[in-house]
Image (cartoon, grey):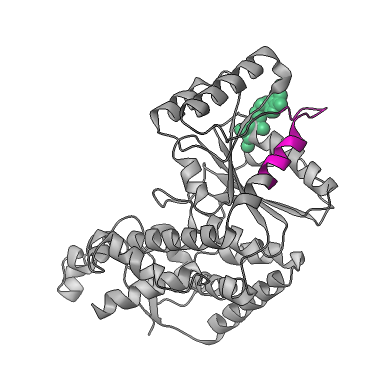
Amino acid sequence: MPVVVGGIIPPADEQEMLSDGVARVYAKDFEIRAHHGLTSSAWWPGATGWPRARLVSRPAGAAASRVAEGAALGARLRERDRSAAAAALNVIEDRSVGGREASRALLQEVSPRALGGEASAHLIGVTGPPGAGKSSLLSALVAMWRGEGRTVAVLAVDPSSKRSGGSLLGDRARIDHDPNDDGVLIRSTAAGTRLGGLAAPTREAATALAPAFDVVVIETVGVGQSETDVAEVADSVAVVVQPGSGDTLQFLKAGIMEVPDVLVVTKADLGDTAVRAARDLAAALSALGSQGTPVLSVSSLAPPSGIDELTEALDAHRAAVDLQVARSRARRLTALADFTAEHGERGLRSLGGHRAARRLLDEEDGALGVADLVAVLERRRAGS
Ligand SMILES: Nc1nc2c(ncn2[C@@H]2O[C@H](COP(=O)(O)OP(=O)(O)O)[C@@H](O)[C@H]2O)c(=O)[nH]1
Ligand SMILES: [Mg+2]
C-alpha cells in the first residue's frame, strides 16, 4: 500500500496525489496523534510552509514511464531541441509526486554535469513595480534579440497565482511576439509560496530552458525583495522603473534594495521627467559607490529607443561574470533555502547551523544540480 510520510499535504495537492495512486491523504488538521501516538510537532518539527511529501512506496509502472518521459525531454533540451520546451514546462509545473519525480529526472539531464559545463543561455532577471513597463520593454527586447538571431524564452512570474496551472490573465498577455516564431517562448508561471526566493517551478523552468535558448528571461513584479529573489537564478538583473517613482530612490538609499546590475528607466518618450529620473538614480548609485552600474533610459513604444544600449549593457554585464562560480554559488544557496524550507531551522541545526551547511556544500562538486545538493544535506542530516 502506498504510504506518504514526511509532511503536511496542501489540500490543493490532494486530488493529484490520489490520482498518482496514493491510497489516502491526511489533511492538515488530521489528528495524527490518534493514529500514531505522535504529537503534530513530533510529526513535523519546525515545519515552515508546505513541505514536500515523500512517497515511500507506490505502483511502479506509470511512474517509471513518467520519469522516462521527463528524462527524454531533458535530453532533448540538452541537444537544444526547443520543440521539447513546452512539454518540459508542463512536467515541471506538475507538482504532484509523480510530476516531481519526472522533473527531477528532467533536470538531471540538463545539470552542468550532464551538459559538461554551465548552460549557455544568458539568464536575465527583469523586475520592477507593476505598470513600470516591463512587459512592453520585453516586447521590444524580444524583437531586438530575434533580429540578432538569438532565441528567447520569457518566464513571466504571475503574482496573482500561488499555484501552478492557475495563472490568471492580467499581467501576462502583454509581451508582443510572433506566435509562429519557434525561436520565442513566452510562459506565465506561478509565484509560489517560498519565502525569500523564487518558486521552485520558476527556477526549475529557467534551468531546464537554459541549454536550449540563447536568452532566458524571468520577469517578476516588485521592488525591494524581488530583485534579490531573481538574483538567485539570473546572471544579470535589470530593475525597471518608470519616471517619477521615488520609491526606488528611497529603497536604494535605505539599502532595502540591492544595487541592480542594470537600472532601466522606462517611458523616455515622456521627456523631462524621464531624463530627471535617470539622472537622480545615477546620482544615488554614485553616492552608494556604484558608479559602474549603468542607468539607461528607454522607450518601448514605437519607435523604441535605448533598446540596443540595453542589450549591450546586459551583454557587457554577462561577459564580466564568472559564470561557473556565480551559478554554482547560486545553486548552493538555493539548495540551502530548499533544505531549510523542508526541514526547518531545526533541520539546519542538525547540520551544525547555516555556516556549517554552507561549508558542507562548498566541498561538493560545483557542477551538482540543486536536487543533488539538497540530497547531500539530507544524507548528512540522516547520518547525524
Ligand atoms: N509612454 C510610454 N508608455 C509606456 C512605455 N512602456 C510601457 N508603457 C505603458 O505603461 C503601462 C504599463 O506597461 P506594462 O508593460 O504592462 O508594465 P508592467 O506592468 O511593468 O509589465 C502600459 O499602459 C504601457 O502602454 C513607454 O516606453 N512609454
Ligand atoms: Mg507585465
Residue 334 in the image: state x and y as whole percent. Answer: 44, 59
Is 348 on the left or on the right of 173, as rendered? left
Q: Tell me, yes or no, whether the highlighted magenta stretch contains residue 70.
A: no
Residue found at the very far top of the displayed protein: 272
State the count of labels: 0
Point out the image quarter for the N terminus.
bottom left
In-image side of 95 versus 218 (left or right): left
Q: Is residue 77 above or below residue 158?
A: below
Residue 24 visible? The answer is no
258 vs 86, nearest the viewer:
258
Q: Is 337 placed above or below 113 here?
A: above
- Which sits in the foreground, 112 or 138? 112
Q: Is residue 214 above or below residue 288?
A: below
Question: Quadrant of residue 352 in the image?
Answer: bottom left
- The quadrant of the image that shows the C terminus is bottom left
Q: Quadrant of residue 245?
A: top right
Find residue 66 and report its horizontal and vertical position in percent.
Answer: 59, 78
* Residue 121 x/y as whole percent: 67, 58
Above or below: residue 322 compared with residue 18: above
Decide whether residue 302 is among the magenta residues.
yes
Please name the residue shown 44% across and 40% down the image: 225
Q: Nearer the viewer, residue 317 or 198?
A: 317
Percent across and percent down for residue 76 are 71, 73
Q: Name the residue nearer the viewer: 59 or 112.
A: 112
* Span colored in magenta: 298-315
Q: Residue at x 52, y 42 (%)?
A: 159
Q: Quadrant of ligand 2?
A: top right
346 vs 327, left or right, is: left
| Residue in the picture at 76% in, 40% down | 176
Q: Does residue 64 appear in the picture of this structure?
A: yes
Write the residue at 43% across / 26% down: 253
